[in-house]
Amino acid sequence: MSKARQTYGEEFQAEAVRLVLEQGLTLQSAAQRLGIPKGTLTNWVSKAKAPGTAAAPGGVTVAELAAENARLRKELAEARLERDIVKKAAAYFARESLPGTRS
């Protein structure tokens, strides 16, 4: 007699992978908690760690994360530049509004 093959949803797989990768549970303890074979969980975690694949089922790839990181760094640099300009303008106008400091 052969066993019936158990299938798991993507959401369940993603949560199982998160238990191991984000919460630091061992493969054995996470598999026991979830009631799944350790080998199955090992396959899911290995697939999630593979470069160029989604971090977890339904997740984003490493390349997408790198692109987002670059975009956010650029936005931060622009925001800092704008902030510095506003600070200098505020200091200039504050100095101009003080009595006896006009040129």
Image (cartoon, rainbow, N blue to C red):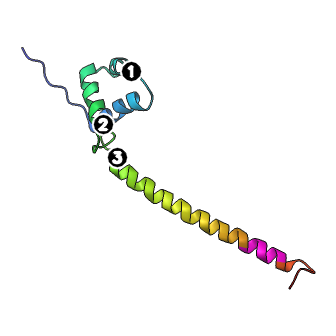
Contact, mark 2 vs mark 3 (Cβ under 8 Å): no
Magenta extent: 89-95
Say which of 6 and 18 sits in front: 18
Kind of residue indicated by mark 1: Thr
Secondary structure type for disc 2 = helix
Contact, mark 1 vs mark 2 (Cβ under 8 Å): no
- Residue closest to the far front: 103
**Quarter of the N terminus within the rendering:** top left
Say which of 40 and 73 sits in front: 73
Q: Main secondary structure of the magenta part?
A: helix
Q: Which tag, 2 or 3, sits closer to the chain's start? A: 2
Q: CA distance from mark 3 to mark 1?
A: 23 Å
Residue 2, given in percent of the width and then of the height, sits at 8, 17
Say which of 9 and 62 sits in front: 62
- Residue 78 to residue 51: above or below: below
Residue 58, given in percent of the width and then of the height, sits at 31, 44
Callout 1: 10 Å neighbours few (<14), some, many (20+)?
Answer: few
Q: How many marks?
A: 3
- Residue 24 as seen in the image, left or right of residue 63: right
**What residue is pinned by disc 1?**
26
**What residue is pinned by disc 3?**
62
Q: Which tag, 1 or 2, sits closer to the chain's start? A: 1
| Magenta-colored stretch includes residue 8 | no
Question: Which is closer to the viewer, label 3 or label 1?
Answer: 3
Q: Which tag, 3 or 1, sits closer to the chain's start? A: 1
| Picture quadrant of residue 99 | bottom right
- Residue 70 as seen in the image, left or right of residue 51: right
Question: Which is closer to the viewer, label 2 or label 3?
Answer: 3
**What residue is pinned by disc 2?**
48
Kind of residue indicated by mark 3: Val
Callout 3: 10 Å neighbours few (<14), some, many (20+)?
Answer: some
